[in-house]
Structures are given as C-alpha cells and as structure tokens.
Image (cartoon, coloured by chain):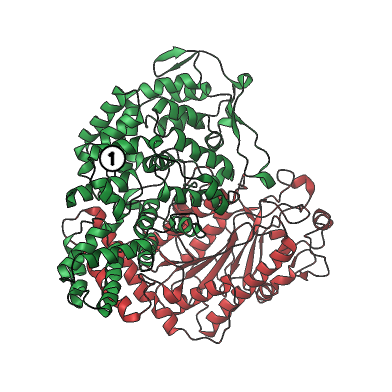
Chain colours: A green, B red
Amino acid sequence: MGDRDLALAAHLMRRAGFGASRGELETLAARPYEDVVGDLLRPERFPEVEEDLVDRYYGWDSFHGPPARWIYRMVNTRRPLQEKMSLFWHHVFATAFFKSEHVASLNRQLQMFQRVGMSDMRTILLELSRDPAMIYWLDNNENVSGEPNENYGRELLELFSMGAGNYTEDDVKMAARAFTGWTFAQPIPLYPHGHYDARFEYRPEEHDDSVKTFLGETGRFDGGDIIDIIVRQPATAAFIARHLYNFFVADEPQVPAWPIEPPRDPEAIRILVGAYLDSDGDMRTVLNAMFTSDFFKEAQFRRVKSPAELVTGVLNLVETHRTPEPGIGVYQAAVTAMGQELLNPPTVEGWHTGKEWIDGGALSERVNFAVNEVGDGSKPGIQAIVRRVSESGSELSPEEFMSVCLSLVGPLTVGDETRAALMAYAESQGPLRFHTEADEEASARRIVRMVQLIVSSMEYQFA
Amino acid sequence: MAQNGHNGKDPALVIVQLSGGNDFMNTLIPYTSAVYHDSRPVVGIPADKVLPMDDQLGWHPSAAALKEMFDDGSVAVAQGIGYPNSSRSHFRAMDIWHTCEPVEVGTEGWLGRATREIDPGGENVLTAVNFGRGLPRALAVPGVPVTSVGDLENYGLMTGIGDDDQRREALDVFKQMYAPAVGTGPVMDYLARTGLDVLKGADELKKAPAMYESDVEYGDNAIAQSLRDAARVHLAGLGSRILYTSHGGYDTHANEVPTHPQLLSDLSGAISDFFADLRAHDAADNVVMLVFTEFGRRIKDNASGTDHGTGGGAFIIGDPVRGGLYSEYPSLDPSRWANGEDLEHTIDFRGVYGTLLEQWMGIDPTEIVGGHFEQILPFANGS
C-alpha cells in the first residue's frame, strides 16, 4: 500500500462520506479501490446506526434535535454514502424549517432521502412529490383543480430536475395541474404534539383530471406521469449530473449561472449523462461511473468543504462522539455558525457552495473550531497521531516531522507558502526527539501544535 | 440629503435586534384603553403600574430607563411599524426585515448593502461589526467584508491557544500560510485575502479593550455586555459605522408576566448605560440606535403569554434624535384589527430604514430597501 492509495482512499471517504480515521483509511487503502466503491454503493451490506441508543441521548422535540442527530449519524454511520447522498438531496431539494416550523415532517423528509436517495430518479422524484414537508414548503397543498398553485410544478422543473431553459411556461402550468390534489393530511396540532409528522394524501376531488400536453406528450396526466416524462429527458440527466459533479467532484458556479456558463469539465458531465440515460436514471450506476472515473480520482482538494463536511471531518480526525454522549449539539451550532444551518437552508435554491461558504466570520469559525478540536491531546484521534509520529523514529528531522503530520492529517497536499510556513515552525525547535520521557512530552506538544497549524491552513478548507 | 449635527464626525448606526417578537403593546402601553385591559386579562399591565407618557400611552414599569431617555427627548418611537401581509414565522419574518424582500426570498442584507455604499473597496474590515456569533443576514452580502465578534476580549484566530507567545507564533505561521501566492487561482486568492482580513480586523479590534476606560457599570446580562462591546469599539475610533447586536428571548408565548419585564429591564438599562458611556467620552453626537423586532404580538393574550402577531414598534435613540411619537399607534378598535386579531401596521419598516439611511447616514436608500417608502423626520436638524 503506497501513499497514493492512502491519498485516494482519503479522497474517496471525504467525498463519498465524511472522512475516516487513519486506521479505517489504511484498511480501505489495502483493498482494491473498486471493491471499496462497491461497498459504498451497497449500504444494505452494513448495519444501520442504532437509533434506539441515540434516542436515549438526543431529543426530537426541539428544532435542534434532528440536525444534531444527523451530525451524529454522519460521523458514525457505517453507510457513509447513503448519508452523503441524503445531504446531497437536501442541498438540491432544499426544504427549510422556517416556513413550517414543523420539525417532525422535515425529519420524515430526511428519512426519505436516507431510504430512497440511492435508488432511481423516478422513485426519488415521486417520493419527493409525496413528501409533506416539500408539499407545504412549495404550497402544493394549495394546488387544486381550477385554482392551480404553480410553485411546486415550477421548482420541480427548474430546480429539481431539468433546469431553466429546457421547458416552456405552458409546461410549468401543465405540471402544476397534474399535481393538483397531491396534499397531506393535517398533522396533529404542532403545540404540544409537534413531534408527529404529516402524511401524504391524494384527494381525487381536488385533482384536475383533464387532458394535458407536457413536453410534447399528451394525455390525462397526473403527477406520476409528469415525473415519468421528466426523468427520461436528457436535460434532467445533464442537470443532475452537474449537481453531482458540483457536490462530489469539483466546485461549479452557482445553479442560476448554469444556463450561461458551460460545465468546468464537459467530458465528465458527458460520462455521467451517459450512465444516467443507459440505466434509466439509476443513481448507483451514475455514482459508480463517477467514483471510478479518472476525473474523480484527479479532483483531490478541488472543492471547498461545506460546513457539515468540515465539522464531521474534524470529528473523524479526533475520533470523539463514537457513542451517543451529551454535547453533540455543540457541533450542530458550529455548522450553523459557519453558515449552514442543517434542515434550514436559506431558500429553495439551497446553499451557495464553493467559495461562497467563506467570509471573514465563517473562516474564523472554521479555523478556530478545527484548531480547538485538535488542540486537545487527550482525544483518541490526536493520541493516535502522536503515537504514530513517535513510532516513525526516535528522532525526526523537521522535514520528516512536518511531512508525517501532513500525511496523518490527510494525507494533505499543500502549496509552497503553507509548506514553508509549517517548515519554519518545525525548524524553530530543531529535530523532534523521543529519547527521554521529557522529550516525549515536549514532542507531543509540538505535534499537537503542528496539527493545529495544518488544520488552520487554506488547503484544509478544501475537500 | 440632510446633514445632521454630528460635528463633522462620520455618523454611526447601532442596531439592536430583539429576537422572538417583542410585545409592543406591553412596552408602550395603551393603558387607558378598555380594549387593552379586556383583551389581556393575564399579561395586561394595570393602569396604576404604567409609567404614563400622556393620557393614552405609558411605558412598561420595567422600561423606566427608556422612559427617562424619552423624557429627555432622545427617543423617537416608530409606532405601528410593519409591512403588508406580515409573516408570523420568526425565521421568515426576520429574513424579511433583514433583506427587505417580503415577497421573494432575498439573500442580500440591507446593512451589507449599506456597508458596500460606505466602503465600496472593502478597505476597512471593521466598517460593519456584529457582536454575536455568526453573521445576521442583514449584514451578509457576498464580497462585502464584515466582522463578527463573539467575544471582544478574545476575538480573532487561534484564540484557544492560551499562552500569548505561542499564540503569536501560531498567528505568524497563519499569516505566512495565507500570504498571497501567484498562480493558485481565484478561489485561493479570495481565501488568502479573507484570512488576512480577519487578522487585520483582529489586530485593530484588540486595541478597543486596551484603550477603554469608563466609570459606567453595565449590567451583568447579555445585552448589556454586547452594548458595552459596541461602545468600546466605537470609542476606539476604528472607523466602524454599523454596529449590530441581538437580544434574544422575546418569544413570550408562555409565562410572559415574569419573563417580559426582565427583558425590558435588561434592555432599557443597557441602552441607557450605553449612551451614558458615550456621553461621558464625548462620543454620543455621531451615534444613533435602531431597536427593532420581527413582529409584535397578538392583541389578546392566551392566558399565559401572547402569540405571534403583527404591527410592532421600533425605537430610534440618540442625542441627535428629536424624541417623540412618530407614525400612529395602531387602532385598538376591533373593527380595525388586522386578521380580526392583530394590530394593523401604520408605517412600513422600509420607510424607517430609509429614514436612517438617508437622513442619518447620508446614503440613498432606494436600491438598499427596494423602492421608495414614506419616511419619518426624527432628527433635530432634519430636512
């Protein structure tokens, strides 16, 4: 197993998961890469997170419960890609707490993403269209025969499947009419019973059963027929491919610019579109094509980490919160302070990603969070790093000291400025020695400081 | 544009956000109205407890410090502030106040836009400063540097490193790592500039606590400490023009009787101390404060507290202010209740923002608030 295998395994786990401990990465790097991808694509081979145990520690009742639990799942799941795809769909089908203030239905939506997020596009859009949180978010409960509300029909086309410029205003109207009568049963009142969710309800008396022409096809369409037509469109394949590329491979411009700016890597999009069309929109097929491609393997550190990725990545580095314990809410608050309030995105367009994650306040939060987390030498992951450095020799040159730390934190590739700055720190106190107990203590402190400096670097902001 | 009496100094605007929906009817109380007392058997303040302003309105007894400032003529009340079809969701309503977009969902904050007008090149990273964690959307505009200070004593990077020498060493390494490099691309360039901006802001901000001396003793509560931080930054003369902070806990659905008076008492005391502090340093003549909340509360109480309503009130405070009542107190006549249960708004909040931007800050508000809205004239030398 070489450093390249390790770097590739780390890259895969940052993208298809939420990072992994060094020990886990070494196990993964020793296996054929395609097998590791195969396991990621088959979450059912691995046990679920034990919700019963989580229930005893983390509540449901307030808004802060479910996002904190989700962070726990991200860090501890043995089905990391299933959880990452849930985050992906949450980015694309952005539904926010602020309108409904109904956390139980949002949580139900999240569970739906976990359940069907890696199935096929038809199943996913059908479930989405029947999801109470989405129905309320985009007013489809007010979409009735004779008085259509176009909100859901429009966003389904513009933001959830085909992208602007690939359909007409008439298509929007027809789609809206097809989804009339798709609503939800009134939940039990929010106060004091807020943790009961709503459920989908189809009301034939509110449905517009007339003949409709949609994207050139004509029939007595209902919502399911509309989705059947949408998922066959090459525009849908291209739109979802670009979303996947932006989320898993490298930062693209924001969605509203897509009709104008061409993709960063048109050949990559072509490959993903091909996989989508050949498999009738099967997500596992598309994801497999992506993760095994050269364009994916070559895209290390080409995306700015989202706050959720940064926080969960650090937690996987320090290896804490492996079982439920108080304090997970701190991490939800950290993700929020960095600009990503989970389950409460700012608009239906979702979060702006890439460099737009970064402003002065967010960068301070990111740097201080990571520096503080890794600064505690008693955390298991940090203890492991210190142990591994000390096992690599009884005396390390400054160059070796820096390199082995960069490797253990990532392996992280850094630019000349960062390398020179870290090297200056490494040299400031000479070689790293482990001859005596006093040496060991001093060296442990230097290793912790080196790791703190590494996680504060620009390069660490990238996935 | 009007030029106000701030002695040639740049005008500064302090914003205090009351989060949760302050009960305006229990802040400035229509204490002689039978409708008020009938509607609020539980949370209503008895007429003999109210601090009267005139024969119709009076201050909540816990807002005595605010009343005193009003009597001194430095508090303007924008009565009945709101907007059409007021949202009852905290999040959405606060977003609307932050972005001035009541119909579409907006992402750019009005004060972020104002910051861009004041400092188009982003020269001073302290032009706008938030006191609190995270950035309120009101201050967020892509590309506009804004500083957010959780803890002024301990602001900046690497704050978890306790030892001063070691922290300085770590910051030196950070500075080298974020040095501008050639050929690394626009994202890296942006990240490097942002990192160095944070360092620069922190270097400047740490002067503030060091320079500060005052005889004013602020209360031991969150809003008092936040406003003390704002005073220290203002007094340090770092070029800050917009200072923002929030005071939470106003969502008084239940147990309003014990909770709301404490909030008003903390808030009024903090504001009073803030201005006393500025006056003691001869630094109050270029500061105006806006106190706002995302909505008022329902006219009728729910036997424990009050639910989300509309038409609230905002306060414009400061020595340059011509104190008094502006706009109209919403009618209590049940036939004029909005939605049959709410105070009708009588002035659009965007007009009050426009008032502050145009008449105080000297900035054209049209683009910032999204149109022309009726303004009030709360400044002594106003046009």
Locate residue B200, reporting x and y percent.
32, 71
Locate residue A234, reporting x and y percent.
31, 24
Locate residue A43, reporting x and y percent.
39, 37
Locate residue A323, reporting x and y percent.
47, 54
Rendered image quadrant of residue A38: top left
Q: Which residue is mark 1?
A: A36
Rendered image quadrant of residue A376: bottom left
Q: Of helix, strand and loop, which one carries label 1?
A: helix
Q: Residue at x 19, y 63 (%)?
A: A403
Q: Residue at x 38, y 43 (%)?
A: A80
Q: In the orientation shown, which residue stands out farthest toward the front? A: A436
Task: Please name whichever residue, A341 or A171, is drawn nearer the observer in this view of the structure.
Answer: A341
Q: What's under tag 1, amino acid-wise?
A: Val
Task: Please name whichever residue, B305 or B127, is drawn nearer the observer in this view of the structure.
Answer: B305
Subunit ID for the residue under disc 1: A
Task: Please name whichever residue, A332 or B306, is drawn nearer the observer in this view of the structure.
Answer: A332
Q: Is residue B179 visible?
A: no
